[in-house]
Image (tube, rainbow, N blue to C red):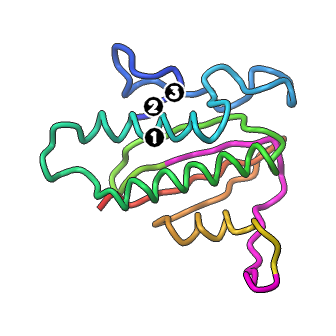
């Protein structure tokens, strides 16, 4: 059930964010793509609330929701800051958890080097956090960019 930046409608489970930009790179986000990490977190929050609202004791724990929001924030922030801009975003509940997919305009891979906090400058830990907090993460390269799909367990 994909959820998009347009918010709940008649059937939010079928809403989808365009996976390719409708505007030239650098012209701002495509219609339906969140403008920033806060907007993406709002989409994920609404999706989780819609999925689990009213299910006493059956929703994800607060720490799981916090992990999902942190992963969402890191992926979107990295797409905006280092990936040439956010070009696509989806969040959906699947068997096994919450699947967040972020597309950007860069073919450069995420930085995977372990950093020593004692000697490293501030920042540079986002990809490490994403890998640690997800059940599975994959990067798919395509002409003009990449797609990162992260599965966050909701139990």
The mark lying in front, picked from 3 and 1, is: 1
Q: Which residue is mark 3?
A: 16
The picture quadrant where one finds residue 12 is top left
| Residue shown at 65% from the left, 32% from the top | 19
| Residue shown at 52% from the left, 41% from the top | 41
First in residue order: circle 3 vs circle 2: 2
Q: Residues within 10 Å of mark 2 (few under 14, many from 20)?
A: many
As drawn, the label of residue 44 is 1
State if disc 2 and disc 1 touch (CB < 8 Å). yes
What is the C-alpha distance between the residues marked 3 and 2?
6 Å
Residue 30 % position (x, y) = 71, 23
Whether residue 27 sits left or right of residue 68 in the image: it is right
Magenta-colored span: 100-119
Whether residue 25 sits left or right of residue 68 in the image: it is right
Q: Helix or strand or loop: what does disc 1 sit on?
A: helix
What is the C-alpha distance between the residues marked 1 and 2?
8 Å
Name the outermost residue toward the top. 10
Residue 118 % position (x, y) = 76, 86
State if disc 2 and disc 3 touch (CB < 8 Å). no
First in residue order: circle 3 vs circle 1: 3
The mark lying in front, picked from 3 and 2, is: 2
| Residue shown at 37% from the left, 44% from the top | 93
For the C terminus, which image quadrant? bottom left
Residue 3 % position (x, y) = 45, 31
The mark lying in front, picked from 1 and 2, is: 1
Q: Which residue is mark 2?
A: 3
């Amino acid at each position: 059930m994909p959820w998009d930046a347009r918010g709940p409608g008649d059937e939010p489970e079928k809403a989808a964010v365009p996976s390719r930009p409708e505007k030239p790179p650098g012209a701002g986000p495509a219609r339906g793509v969140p403008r920033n990490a806060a907007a993406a977190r709002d989409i994920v929050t609404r999706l989780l609330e819609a999925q689990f609202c009213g299910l006493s004791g059956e929703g994800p724990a607060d720490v799981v929701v916090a992990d999902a929001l942190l992963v969402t924030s890191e992926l979107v922030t990295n797409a905006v800051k280092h990936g040439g801009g956010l070009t696509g975003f989806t969040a959906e509940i699947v068997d096994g958890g919450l699947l967040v997919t972020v597309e950007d305009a860069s073919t450069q891979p995420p930085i995977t080097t372990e950093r020593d906090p004692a000697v490293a400058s501030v920042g540079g830990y986002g990809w490490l956090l994403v890998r640690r907090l997800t059940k599975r993460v994959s990067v798919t390269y395509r002409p003009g960019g990449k797609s990162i799909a992260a599965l966050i367990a909701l139990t």
